[in-house]
Amino acid sequence: MTDPTDPKAAPDAAALPVRADRSPIERAGDKRPHGDRRAVGGDTLAALLPLVPEIKLLVGVSTAAVIIAALYFGRVVLVPLALAILLGFVLDPLVDVFRRWGLARLPAVIVVMAMVLALLGIAGTLLGNQVSSLSAQLPIYQSNIQHKLRDLREKAGRPGMFDGAVKTYKAFKDEVEKAAKEEAEKAAKEAAEAASAPASGAVAPIGRRKPDAPPPIQRVQVEPPPPNAFQDALGWVEASTGLLATAGIVLVFVVLVLLDRDDLRDRLLRLWGGSLHRSTDALDEAGRRITRYLTMQLVVNMTYGVPMAAGLWMIGVPGAILWGAVAAIMRFVPYVGPMISAVFPLVLAFAVDPGWSMVLWTLALIVAIEIISNNIVEPWLYGASTGLSAISLMAAATFWTALWGPVGLIMSTPLTVCLLVIGRHLPRLKFLDVLLGSQPALDAPTRIYQRLLADDVEGAIELATEQVDADGVAGFYNGIGLPALRLATSDASLATAEHRHRIVVGMEALIDDLAEQHPPPEPDAQHVAVCIGGKWELDTLAARMLAHTLSLDGQPASHRLSATRSAEYIAQLDLAGVKVVCISYFSPEPQTPAKHFCRRLRRAWPDLHIVLGLWNAPSELLDDAAAQALGADAVVTSMSEAAVKIAHFLGDVQADGYLPAPVPEIEPERLNALRDSGALDDRAQPLFEVASRRAAEIFDVPMAMVSLIGEHSQLVRGVFGSLPSPSGGAGEAARGDDLDMPRSLSMCGHAVANGQTLVVSDIERDLRFAGNPALKARGLRFYAGAPLTDEAGYVIGTLCILDIRPRVLNQRESRLLEAMARDLMELLRAAATDWGELNSGALPPSQPPSATVGQFVPTIS
């Protein structure tokens, strides 16, 4: 048996107690039985789980470091390849032009490259002649330069207005340097005395060197002889050989990129992996942005260089064409390029003119062209072509310059655009889109909510004022105020008491400020609507916003504090003369308190209309059956919907629940364009039916149609599909002919009047269309219509998609619908041209309009 007191004896591992202070990883190394080791392994895994975010961060940082190192050390190969790809983006549209003219890809690439090389040769010859002529004239200007420099030295040596200040500063500087010199000499003297003292303590005489001390060391610098002409020529040849080799590599890469564009695209898609749809969208967006940016930059540089050359020629600066070309080329270098290109004409103007007028005129020309280019030409041509923020452009220029030098500075914007697109389409790299994109990182509700959390009430009010100026008070409350309070509700369990206090106090101040800026009119009678907070302070804030919205709409309303649902509270409400009460709840489960509160209100005021504002409730509580179960007359989820419901209960004839389609001021011209477009010809109906079928299948909706807006009615000319019965039963489905309706009830009439795509995600909850009887009868809930616009800009109708269920159409899908509408109009114009002279305008003015659409009936041949 082992003696436990023996220090050499190995203790039994199973008998060792497990120390509480040991880490799970240390305990995992104990030699225990198999079952115990499994238990310890589970503890280890559980202990490592909290470290997963740190491990991911470490892996991400390491990966980024490896990629940056590869970009730096592989720049010899990567720089020519990147230049070739960027040039390929610029030249590929020219190749496509020649391919559309009937050439194959190889001959088209040969023609484009021959054109580029010929253009470069002509430009090089012209610029070489300019340089040769200028170098021959430079010695003539030597006397002017010497004379001006002599004048500048003389003027600088004369007494001036700052001589007293300069002398004072110089005297002060001399005194400081003198004191510092004395201190240094004193310290050196003491150090020398200490070093020269003998070991016995005797002090050696100062200024006397020991006989065995080495002599002071004298530095000798050997300068190499100046290079001769042959060595200079050899250096130039070596430098040019490197540039020519790089240019040759870039040229070969450009040819290969243009020839194998489709193959390279396929390989990138294979390397990208994942969803083919997402990968294709990413490559398309990157190519579109980079091509547009490089093309527009070329145009901007030409609009900068040509006026520069013309202006310098008019001023009389030699080599005007050369300096205009230099200015255009240097603008490819962000930020510093224009400044560098401005130095050459200014120096030459200084040398040529004996006076100063040419220098001043040249400076004025450069400043004027720079201002016009930066503030007019670039915003007009660039637009939002890159989608990069200003700070990301600066950071990208610095980063790529540090990696690849001047070439990296030139390519910084296109390369950063690629990173932006990758971050936009890859969820794991979403941070790149946030860091580099020009879009706000936070939406408007989140920005206001953040300002309130930071106790920056003034900043929140400033943001709110900007949004109110754009969308109005009701639009701000509906689109930003309510979402901000929803954020506060969802974060209530995470927020501290101080944060909750800041939200309530800051939002009260914001609403007070808006009420002061936009005061409601004084009511002629007592308030007919009362808005009450259901439970929390946030509910009361929503009630205040709704009361302000109703008052601005001409419906006098007031608000009350959060309800306690007690009998005493109900008795103190004093709702005599009030017709509608709206109770606000942000709770995701408001059933129990809302039901109790509605029951007490019904008991005290039986004739009262009760509207529940369930701003954060699930969808199952939003239908009429749920409202009746809770004891309310209606359930709303937005300010606009609440305004519609309350106006309905008040019996306000001015607010009938829908907005009639307006008539544009150019209505006579628009009607003439409709008659002349060929859309009323029966031969156009197959085009409309094909477009409707394609839209219905692409957007996966039950119905799509092409509608034309006449003088009084909406005419459906092409339709695919039908709208099921809204009840889901055996009711008759709505078809194309059922959607012929008066123009005032037509949603397409709104799109035609505004000339823009109209998207309504939920018709029942939109203030403009909620009470439209034609839409209600057909059970429409979703509408999206893109205008059909002719070459003159007149809108004759829409291509629209419909559904009986609410839907969301994102920005990309909206652009796709607009593109399909444009394609349809192009097909219609081509068909009308083939038909020859149209008959739609050949009717005599006395012929009565059609009873169906209110338009002249065309004579169909």
Image (cartoon, rainbow, N blue to C red):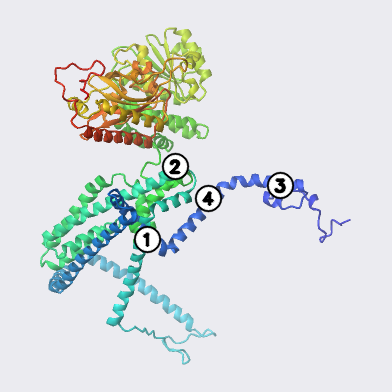
The residue carrying pointer 1 sits among few (fewer than 14), some (14 to 19) or many (20 or more) residues within 10 Å by Cα, namely many
| Type of amino acid at the residue the image marks with label 2 | His
| Type of amino acid at the residue the image marks with label 4 | Leu
Residue at image position (30%, 28%) is 798
Q: Is residue 159 visible?
A: no
Label 4 or label 1, whichever comes before in sequence order = 4
The residue carrying pointer 4 sits among few (fewer than 14), some (14 to 19) or many (20 or more) residues within 10 Å by Cα, namely few
**Front residue (pair 257, 133):** 257
Of the two numbered discs 4 and 1 in the rendering, the one whose residue sits closer to the viewer: 1
**Front residue (pair 103, 565):** 103
Residue that mark 1 sits on: 253
Residue 351 is situated, as x and y percent measured from the top left of the image, at 15, 68
Residue that mark 3 sits on: 40
**Front residue (pair 366, 604):** 366
Which part of the image, by quadrant, shows the N terminus?
A: bottom right
Residue that mark 4 sits on: 57
Of the two numbered discs 1 and 3 in the rendering, the one whose residue sits closer to the viewer: 1
Q: Quadrant of residue 607?
A: top left
**Mark 3 to mark 2: distance in Å?**
46 Å
Residue 729 is situated, as x and y percent measured from the top left of the image, at 47, 16
Does residue 779 sit above or below 57 in this rendering?
A: above
Residue 44 is situated, as x and y percent measured from the top left of the image, at 67, 47
Q: Quadrant of residue 178?
A: bottom left
**Mark 4 to mark 1: distance in Å?**
37 Å
**Mark 1 to mark 3: distance in Å?**
58 Å
| Type of amino acid at the residue the image marks with label 3 | Val
Residue that mark 2 sits on: 277
Residue at image position (38%, 77%) is 185
